[in-house]
Image: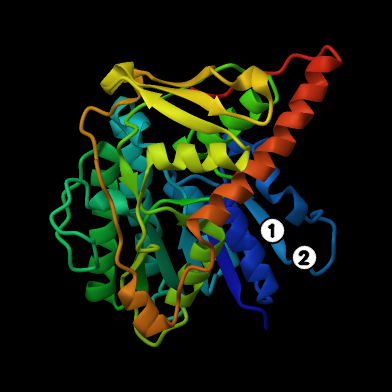
Amino acid sequence: MKKKALITGVTGQDGAYLSEFLLGKGYEVHGIKRRSSLFNTDRIDHLYQDPHEQERTFILHHGDLTDSSSLIHIIQKVQPDEIYNLAAQSHVQVSFEEPEYTANSDALGTLRILETIRSMGLAGRTRFYQASTSELFGKVQEVPQRETTPFYPRSPYAVAKLYAYWITVNYREAYGIYACNGILFNHESPVRGETFVTRKITRALARIYLGIDDCFYLGNLDAKRDWGHARDYVEMQWLMLQQEEPEDYVIATGVQHSVREFVEAAALELGLRLEWNGSGVDETGTVVEAPEQKLVGKTIVRVDPRYFRPTEVESLLGDPAKAKEKLGWEPRTSFQDLVAEMVRFDLEEARRDAMCRREGFAVKNYYE
């Protein structure tokens, strides 16, 4: 019998990588997607199987973390061996604008799944993974951050995820559910959403390099993060559910870079060297070396105060020592290789956009 996995947030970056990983392990993979995301399936289109196919191993269901009845129906029907809760309203900035929705989906959505496992008597069968976040550490109390570091969330998103973290621990201790939290530090890939800062950077630079756009805007250039590759991190998520006892783990690289350094690394992949001038909201990044002379002297990076958060998280750095010691897990992809992979992907995307523009088709911008 194939093991069955149920993934919420299957259309997202992690959902796509995890689906591919589990299918490679011989799983029958079930994914939950919202009806409003009907056409947002680019990341998993290569995995799609027609409902009329016999012996399907990748099956999609319509559901929503804000709707208990859909979750109960799906879990009852699938009877999964493992549930990976990856769905969330995961934009920190958006959580300040939509705090109630963020709490409903990220905090109460986790409770709804755990309560379904408990009430249906699946505690002895179904293992649960909760995608937690380094944003829990917020105003950091210790460097680097590890599993024992005190939390200090600094956004509605982080507060919602804090509830999800502790309700997962509570259901583990109160009801014996195999439930664990993966405290994921920032993880990126070529299929990262275009509104997240890393993908915004690589996409914008590729388009500027090809002459489609002239400039892009960022917020806090000095914010520092621990960036890894999503492909490496989903393996760790799976490993956490294969142990004898459930535990919580930090998933990180242990290496930190600033937003400014990410911009510089991505630019260098295109042969562009930048010089920074000014400070604060007046700071700019200007090209001083480039393969094509027409780019030299152009200011291509500017700061927009709209992208600053009401409460900034200046620095996050994870300590993955526990994961290495207990699970033998280490990230395989270096920071430089991650940046290079993202730039290559977005350069191909930009070339396609440039061709469309030459043929008279409109090309939209997605930098907001």
* In the foreground, 72 or 261: 261
Question: Residue 39: image x %, image y %?
Answer: 68, 35
- Residue at 26% x, 46% y: name it: 315
Colour mapping used in the image: rainbow
Q: Amino acid at mark 2?
A: Arg
Please give the residue where the numbered disc 1 appears in the rendered image: 59
Please give the residue where the numbered disc 2 appears in the rendered image: 56
**For residue 289, side relative to residue 322 (left or right):** right
**For residue 78, side relative to residue 304 (left or right):** right
Question: Residue 319: image x %, image y %?
Answer: 29, 67
Snapshot quadrant of residue 328: bottom left
Tell me if mark 1 has few (under 14), some (14-19) or many (20+) residues whose alpha carbon lies within 10 angstroms of its own: some
| Element type at mark 1 | strand
| Element type at mark 2 | loop
Number of disc labels? 2
Tell me if mark 2 has few (under 14), some (14-19) or many (20+) residues whose alpha carbon lies within 10 angstroms of its own: few
Which quarter of the figure is the N terminus placed in? bottom right
Q: Is residue 62 visible?
A: no
Snapshot quadrant of residue 40: top right
- Marks 2/1: CA distance? 7 Å
Snapshot quadrant of residue 241: bottom left
Question: Residue 279: image x %, image y %?
Answer: 28, 22
Q: Residue furthest bottom?
A: 244
Does residue 34 lie above or below 76 as drawn? above
